[in-house]
Amino acid sequence: MPAPKIILDLMERFERNIDAYKSGAYNETQVRHEFIDPFFESLGWDINNIQGNAEAYKDV
């Protein structure tokens, strides 16, 4: 099974801008917002708890 297009797009963007990401000016919050959250959302995770689950039942 090939990777979903969004994951391929995230990989391409990361490779294209790797020097900026490694510069030290790019922080953890930015990484999560631009790469980690979209990655898990593409796998079907409810990152923002849109379903309104109680704490014990959240995906993240």
Image (tube, rainbow, N blue to C red):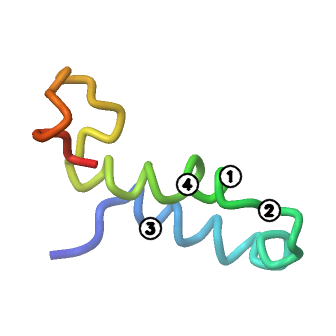
Do the CB atoms of the residues marked 1 and 4 lie less than 8 Å apart?
A: yes
**Which residue position holds label 3?**
8
Task: Name the amino acid type tagged 2.
Answer: Tyr
* Viewer-closest of 16 and 48: 48
Q: Nearer the viewer, mark 2 or mark 3?
A: 2
Q: Is residue 40 above or below residue 45?
A: below
Of the numbered discs 3 and 4, the one sitting upstream in the chain is 3
Q: What element does badge 1 sit on? A: helix
Looking at the picture, how far across and down is residue 4, in whole percent?
A: 30, 61
Q: Is residue 57 above or below residue 38?
A: above
On residue 21, which mark appears? none
**Which residue position holds label 1?**
30
Q: CA distance from mark 2 to mark 4?
A: 11 Å
Residue count near mark 4 (Cα–Cα under 10 Å), binned few <14, some 14–19, many ≥20: few
**Which residue position holds label 4?**
32
Q: CA distance from mark 1 to mark 2?
A: 7 Å
* Viewer-closest of 50 and 17: 50
Q: Nearer the viewer, mark 3 or mark 1?
A: 1
Do the CB atoms of the residues marked 3 and 1 lie less than 8 Å apart?
A: no
